[in-house]
Image (cartoon, grey):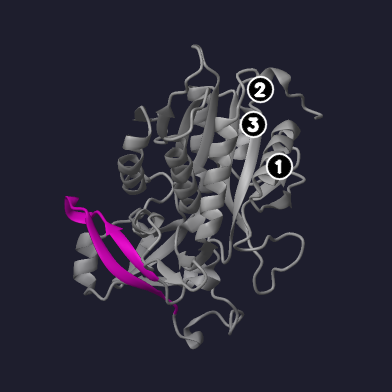
Amino acid sequence: MDPLFPFLKELLTAPGLSGYEDPAAEIISKKWKPLVHEISRGRLGSLHGLRRGSGPSPRPTVMVATHMDAIGLMVTGIVDGFLRLTQVGGIDPRVLPGALVTLHATGAGLSQSIPGVVVLPQTRLLPPDIGLNPVPLEYLFLDTGLPRAKVESLVQVGDLVSFAQPPFELTGDTIAGHSLDNRFSVAALTICLEELQNRPHLWDVWAVATTQEEIGTIGATGSTYELHPNLAIVMDVTFAKGPGANDWQTNPLGKGPTLCMGPNIHPALHKAMKELADKLEIPYSLEYAPRHTGTDGYSTQVVAEGVPTLVMGIPLRYMHTPVEMGAVKDIQRAGRLVAEFIAGLALDFVEKIIWDD
């Protein structure tokens, strides 16, 4: 078994919806503590791990940001013992009927995890215009199997619901489950930190697991203001080739990370990372983002006077579903590439880069 699997599976099992990331943060903090010199939480809950460089003080800093929050659901009402739901982050309601979930109930002053399943009413009970079309979230229910009185005593509006599909390995070193977006990148950053244990680096490194990316890249904004890095590398997942998604807007699975190009990306950083990947013979794909990348890269780029930012993607199939699928080798390659980049940063790198490089 790959030594990464136990940590990755633990991380992919944990809840940690946007704004409620503590369960994931605890797992990451435990893993990172031996790999960094300091660890703390930002004011918006993001996890900050500092690994000091060997250059003369004051040293330049590079922030590697990966978001740890996950999409999920929230209870909006109780009807005859069944629960109405809304989404936390972007969810396609087509994937929800039959989904295994965990209800994090807080009624009666207690905190309990209750298994459940998302269900839809029979077609004849739905509005006629829905028919056999995908059923909107407002008509779906969460069924815990508990009696009505018990549900009403345990559950209150605002309780969270997370996906409960356990992660599982497939052939070809791929893994599927919920929250690969973006726990895959957290795992890649962990590999980067492990690589840096044996590699001297002049710069200080801030390893950051951000909060609330799925609802507006919020945690990254606060972390970038607080840490004020000289450079930022944002690692997130991106769309992999799959059924019905094989054009230029997707990327091959298992063929390495993507290096994003576009106005959200500093061209000199992109060029430097691309040249390094070529030199190391680490496979990658070029990804094109003519506008906002939809990642923490936007928030890191525009803070204060601006931070030169690079966005690296890890290809993922079936994003924002309970069975997201990705290749472990892409995690490993992404982590190693970022570590090599950091190890090679000269103290005057920032002074030498220009926007139109």
Q: Which residue is mark 3?
A: 301
Instruction: Name the outermost residue toward the right.
Output: 356
Q: Helix or strand or loop: what does disc 3 sit on?
A: helix
From the top left corner, tell me how far across and down residue 247 is, in percent: 76, 65
When the figure is inspected, residue 179 is found, relative to residue 50, above or below; the finding is below
Comparing 356 with 130, the one in front is: 356
Q: Residue at x 48, y 41 (%)?
A: 192
Residue 5's quadrant in the figure? bottom left
In the rendered structure, which amino acid carries the disc numbered 2? Phe
Mark 2 and mark 1 in contact? Answer it, CB < 8 Å.
no
Q: Helix or strand or loop: what does disc 1 sit on?
A: helix
Which secondary structure is most common in the magenta stretch? strand
Q: Which residue is mark 1?
A: 274
Q: Mark 2 or mark 3, which is nearer to you?
A: 2
Q: Residue at x 58, y 65 (%)?
A: 317
Comparing 300 with 79, the one in front is: 300
Mark 3 and mark 1 in contact? Answer it, CB < 8 Å.
no
Q: Which residue is mark 2?
A: 349
Residue 99's quadrant in the figure? bottom left
Q: CA distance from mark 2 to mark 3?
A: 17 Å
Q: Helix or strand or loop: what does disc 2 sit on?
A: helix
When the figure is inspected, residue 35 is found, relative to residue 153, above or below; the finding is above
Q: Which residues are magenta?
A: 100-120
In the rendered structure, which amino acid carries the disc numbered 3? Gln
